[in-house]
Image (spheres, helix red, strand yellow):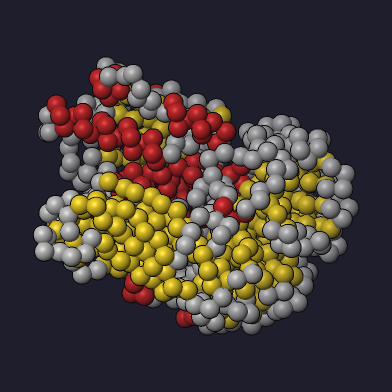
Amino acid sequence: MKKLTGTALILLLLTFFAQAQRTPEQLYENDFPAPEFPPGLDWINIDEPLTVAGLQGKIVILDFWTYGCVNCLHIIPVLEQVETKYADEVVVIGVHSAKFATEGQTENLRQIVQRYEVHHPVVNDNEFAIWRSYGVNAWPTVALINPRGNLVVRQSGEIPFEAFDTYLSGMIEYYDGLDETLIDRTPLQLALEGASDLGTPLLYPGKVLADAASGRLFIADSSHNRIVIADINTHEVLDIIGSGARGFAGGTFDEARFDKPQGMALDGDWLYIADVNNHAIRLADLAAREVMTLAGNGIMGRSRLPFGQNIPNPLGVSLRSPWDVELDDAGHLHIAMAGTHQLYVYEPATNRLFPSVGNGREANLNGVSLADSELAQPSGLYYAGAGKLYFADSESSTIRLADFEADLVSVVSGTTENSLFDFGDIDGELGANRLQHALGIEGAPDGALYIADTYNSRIKVIPAGETGTQTLAGLGGAGGYADGPVNQAQFDEPGGLSFAEGILYIADTNNHVIRLLDLEAGAVDTLRFQNPEALIIDAEALTLLGGNQGDDELTRLEPQQVAAGEGALNLQLSFADELKINPLIDSQLVVTLDGEAQIEAAVAQNVFSLPIIFVEGSGNLQAELTLYYCREGAEALCYIESVRWEIPYETAESATQSEIVLARQINAPEV
């Protein structure tokens, strides 16, 4: 078994569901019946197990995945698009064939389905029965079953929405042309796990950052899509960064939107944030209470970049799942770019961004230079000084060291073999000990290294001056929740660590809490907020903001009367003082006529005109603007505003106008 990375994505665009010189029968028909699902498996998001026979008439997409695989996570939002557009014709089924033992436990899988908002049926194929029957050999893989119940496609890799869209639309047109009753458009009745918020103050917190100097504690409240700031001593909630609505937007703390934020790094009143599902590095100005974007355009990249390649425009690049950030003593920001299996460096002073460790191939290759090393989904960072950057390399289940002065990558905990399948829960010397998908690494002033051994639900330590790894806290196994002495405490997939004044702060992700491990006392306690009411999300306000679907602001105009024929859509932007369109990244206007014809154009000026042909009769025009703007002289710091308009129109011989005007005032974010 192997895990397919993103290296072949460009080829997939050309080869997946390739339709050139193939007849519809060759594309959409096959005589091979799709193998039936074995009985006795656990199903999630559905009341009763599904069968291939019972799904006849539906187009079925099987997504073979494992939840620790970042490439598999990249498929989830793509399938969400498919489910939205083809809700009546297509059924998506997640076939979860676990790599790690922990991933194969149904209760853990239930947690993950909620954490990543998977809204389709998922079957726990932890014995690889479905995997084998469909001939799968890599994560992720999709298999597609036509309405007759025959298997027509099996393809590995991260498949873009455009490929699904082209193939599915063609298949639907083909079968409707044969007989409109061949496709069953009856909705599938789901029973979603965690269909509503759990009501916990935090929801799957991924990372935590303790700063004793400022007396603040920063928590990535990941599935609430926000950052919580608390007093490190009193545990009073001081502020919240982000509205709680899922999306990609800057502005004030109340307006800003994130999508599953994780790692953070602090420089005075500047908080750097790894915004994972927005594939961006964000910056929160804590004094001004503003959020900006430093790198990433909000679009997931489809390829890795070569080691050392300078990215001249960080705001225009498509990144891939940055999971953690860490500052070094030179003020450079190190980034764990999990999706390309590399580390990056961002230099705030020069606005430079470049891959700094790893060639992008997914492996556990050590004892080589930074350029030649091969990583596997780095997800946690700790800078120890003197050019030494430790990182939790999750898919190789190791803790590794990038030594920038020696130009060397080595392993300090976990297997020393070049293997992605050599994992376990074993204490001992380097080479003999084993971890399981560790996500966090942190150091203490005395030189000790602490490890969030995530899938073992333990906290482990490499004592100062030693080379062996030993369990510090947690009972392991399936995980649990218990405070008390370290030999009795329990965690559930902890993902992040931070040290301050003798306390190890732990993001106990699946328990939805922050834990405090007092190293001197040898005891674990749970952080209890002094004012938990400050963390309550107003469901009504969240709905007005667009909920957790990341909906942009929608403006519906009154019906417009226009002359038939050649016309125009005029966009007029007015900016407050010192604001302007950011020249470092293309703003985009997408116009859709009557739900079909689509026109895209880059917006580089405040007044912009787009030619439109108004067909005689009535229709509907939709316009979507993604605007990147900045302050004069601060082009590297980017605000984002997304606006949608819906404009019904009708043509009339008496109409004197042949254009529609869209006006928007862009104001400075309120402080």
Give the total number of marks visible in the rendering.
0
Front in this rendered view, residue 591 or 427: 591
Is 657 placed left or right of 305 in the picture? left
Vertical relation: 49 (above or below) 625: above
Q: Quadrant of residue 123?
A: top left
Which residue is drawn at the image coordinates 51% and 80% (left, top)? 670
> Where residue 393 appears, x then y in whole percent?
67, 45
Is 74 placed left or right of 617 in the picture? right
Front in this rendered view, residue 537 or 289: 289
> Where residue 457 appears, x then y in whole percent?
61, 53
Vertical relation: 207 (above or below) 116: below
> Where residue 378 appears, x then y in whole percent?
66, 46
Which residue is drawn at the image coordinates 47% and 81% (left, top)? 533
Which quadrant holds the N terminus? top right
Can residue 243 be seen by looking at this rendering?
A: yes
Is 445 placed left or right of 434 in the picture? right
Which residue is drawn at the image coordinates 76% and 51% (left, top)? 390
Which residue is drawn at the image coordinates 73% and 59% (left, top)? 350
Which quadrant holds the C terminus? bottom right
